[in-house]
Amino acid sequence: MATIKEVVGKKGKKYQVTVRKKGYKPEYKTFDKKTEAKDWGQDVETQMKHGTWGKSVEGEIDTIQTVKDLIDYFEEHEAPRRYTKVEKYKVMYDWWRDKIGNVPLSDVTSSMLTQYKNILAKEAPSKPYKEHEYKSNSTVRKYLFALSAILSYAESELELINKNPMKKVGKPEKSKGVVRFLSDDERKLLIKGCKEYSERLYIFVLLAIYSGGRYSELLTLKVENVDFENCMLHFTNTKNNESRGVPVYIKIIEKLKNYLDQNDITDGYIFLNKETGNIYYLKGAFEAVVKKVGIKNFRFHDCRHTYASYLAQNGAELLEISILLGHKSLQQTQIYAHLTRKHTAKVVRKMTANTFDDI
């Protein structure tokens, strides 16, 4: 059957249609208009029904002989079904294709993968970040897990190999999260710089610092997702595909309302360029302001860290922070634990003072 999904990117809103039918590989195509996506999907479905569409997927598996063949097959048939942003895995797939693409599947061993893990760990990062000389543990782990998912697929679903050799390969210890958040002076500098740059960036960064929204969540925020009466933002386009509501200070909601009124935005995407029909790319403007005001080692995602850190320092419990950030597990929120200790100590002292009896 054909399904249509709305996709929002740098070039604006698109419609991705997916057609799946037994005996055929899944077909994907993106259109500017929903009607075009619907028509194409119906046409493909009809051709598949009458056996006139392309060629059947049956027999394609027999052609998979090498690691490259397997990666190519997974990337085309399985990755679009599993991942919403397949493109972010391409650099990893390309790396493995380059290193062991010509190796027959039957010759891939745990010791071979361990050797390439060590090669990967000694490579320079693709982008210079905080003067790292080599790829971080986190990056190495992502590369290993990307190939492991493909090998597991070959084992369990395609039955091309008896076992996944990546299971025996030791993964580097997960890098401890570095919590970079704004000091009071930095926060004032950043907000002032954003306001001077544009009212749009000013509102965007205020929402980031005081709602904890991810970049993509804020960029795709719609007027309909704002509860002005109860001062709430509702994030629906989230990383975990689970909607969440976040309370926001009334003065920030008022500033947002003024921005919408001044720009005659009554519905749809808040940060949409009406002239082009595309959503604004605000990360570049943000990075320019950060550089201009002289804040060091601060990324947009650190606005989210700032929000969580401020919550922790003002008495929020880890569970509360986890819910507000939309984390799937409390373990993800543990990086803020040290910031809650001071408040916890105050709570313990107050409890003891109120209940301790001289005995």
Image (cartoon, rainbow, N blue to C red):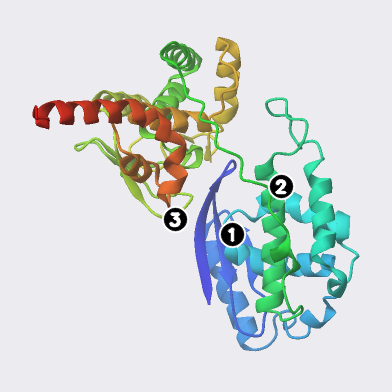
- Answer whether residue 264 is visible to the viewer in this image: no
User: Residue 57 lies in what quarter of the image?
Assistant: bottom right
Q: In this view, does 271 lie to the left or right of 80?
A: left
Q: Disc 1 vs disc 2: which is toward the camera?
A: 2
Question: Which residue is disc 2 drawn over?
Answer: 140
Q: Position of residue 252 (x, y in %)?
A: 30, 25
Question: Which residue is disc 1 drawn over?
Answer: 83
Local SS, label 3 = loop
Query: Depth check: 181 or 330 in front?
Result: 330
Q: Is residue 41 left or right of residue 139?
A: left
Q: Three-letter amino acid code at disc 3?
A: Asn
Q: Position of residue 88 (x, y in %)?
A: 66, 49
Q: Position of residue 68 (x, y in %)?
A: 83, 65
Q: Disc 3 vs disc 2: which is toward the camera?
A: 2
Q: How far apart are marks 3 and 2 (CA)?
A: 26 Å
Question: Which residue is disc 3 drawn over?
Answer: 241
Q: Three-letter amino acid code at disc 2?
A: Val
